[in-house]
Image (cartoon, helix red, strand yellow):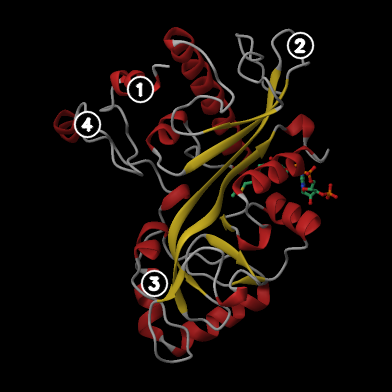
Amino acid sequence: MVEFRFDIRPLFTQPIVKVTSNLLPHTFRGDRRQCLDATSKMSEIIDRLGQLSANAQKLNTPVTTAQRLRMSENQTIYLLADINQGNNGAVIGLLKVGTKDLYLFDETGQTRKVENTPCILDFYIHESRQRAGLGKDLFETMLADEKWTPIKCSVDRPSEKLLGFLKKHYSLVRTIPQANNFVLYEGFFDDGSSSAATKQTNGAGNGMYITNSPNTQLFGATYLGEENNKKRMQRHLEATPNLASQITQISPVGRYGARRPTCSMAEIIHSGTTPTKGAESGSGQTYEKLNADYIL
Ligand SMILES: CC(=O)SCCNC(=O)CCNC(=O)[C@H](O)C(C)(C)COP(=O)(O)OP(=O)(O)OC[C@H]1O[C@@H](n2cnc3c(N)ncnc32)[C@H](O)[C@@H]1OP(=O)(O)O
């Protein structure tokens, strides 16, 4: 369990709290001074849990940091705590979700642009409390809150443990092959579309068609899934050798990619402006914006 030098209980008035870009628990009520104190503590909590999650997944760079959350437009972190642990309580787990516009293959191999795809981005329960049903509690809370169903979620490069988790609790097994790091399960496109808006990006033909899509450029061409699905994908790629070379030339980046070096000139130019979604470094954003937004 993850304990802190400060008492976490004022932040966790209930076991699971939700945090968005304001870095405050959704239950937070307080004045400006309390707000600053809470965001600072919540940042520390998110950074610690994000780092532990990265360690557990053997990632070089955490997927989850307070800075990234602060700059995001549509990401939410659910945090689970045990307020009875020790003197200050302890944080046990983290689940980060968000929505993305993705180019995805459906079951027939055709590309669809799916807007606002529900995505599971990062999930971690402290090692000392795994396999006790706490991950399920956190996941269920998220599903109810977001009004999502598991089969309509895409999962950003799930670990073996998460694949096991989804199989055990939601009977999710059969995946739809993708050319990016996201894993989808059969049923995602049922009802003719996902729960989000979808559109087929290339009308004609029944064969698989891989676009040079923003998603492929961003996340690279990596396929995860069952062995038979891999073979199916391989057959398509062998039938279209140019396509295969096009894909392999795109180097994998995204959640497994190294952090981009900060451009100090860009920081000077953009200093004080609202950072764009997905920007890695938020050092140009000052606390004045934070304060202005959250003076209560
Ligand atoms: C998109 C992403 O975030 S990918 C990264 C996912 N996170 C990680 O891999 C980090 C390390 N793992 C964890 O933090 C946790 O194991 C989680 C978040 C995946 C699941 O949380 P838990 O509280 O353990 O889940 P819960 O107790 O509800 O369910 C248990 C099931 O999850 C899977 N699981 C959990 N821990 C393990 C483990 N150590 N080894 C294998 N499977 C595991 C199993 O299917 C398990 O069922 P079982 O005990 O009957 O085999």
State which tag comes first along the sequence, 1 or 3. 3
State which tag comes first along the sequence, 4 or 1. 4
Residue visible at 39% across and 65% down in the picture: 216
Judge from the rendering whether residue 234 lies leftward or rightward of residue 22; answer left or right: right
**Rounded to the nearest whole Å, what is the CA distance between mark 1 and mark 3?**
41 Å
The residue type indicated by label 1 comes to Leu
The residue type indicated by label 2 comes to Gly
Q: Percent position (x, y) of residue 65?
A: 47, 32
Q: Which residue is mark 1?
A: 290
Q: Percent position (x, y) of residue 172?
A: 73, 63
Do the residues under discs 3 and 4 have CB atoms within 8 angstroms? Answer: no
Residue visible at 38% across and 82% down in the picture: 202
Q: Which residue is mark 2?
A: 86
Of the two numbered discs 2 and 3 in the rendering, the one whose residue sits closer to the viewer: 2
Is the N terminus in the top left, top right, bottom left or bottom right quadrant? top right
Do the residues under discs 4 and 1 have CB atoms within 8 angstroms? Answer: no
Q: Which residue is mark 4?
A: 273
Of the two numbered discs 3 and 4 in the rendering, the one whose residue sits closer to the viewer: 4
Residue visible at 45% across and 74% down in the picture: 112
Quarter of the image where ligand 1 sits: top right
Do the residues under discs 2 and 1 have CB atoms within 8 angstroms? Answer: no
The residue type indicated by label 3 comes to Ile
Front one among 6 and 19: 19
Q: Which quadrant of the structure image shows residue 36?
A: top left
**Rounded to the nearest whole Å, what is the CA distance between mark 4 and mark 2?**
42 Å
Alpha-carbon neighbours of circle 3 within 10 Å: few (<14), some, or many (≥20)? many
Q: Which residue is mark 3?
A: 247
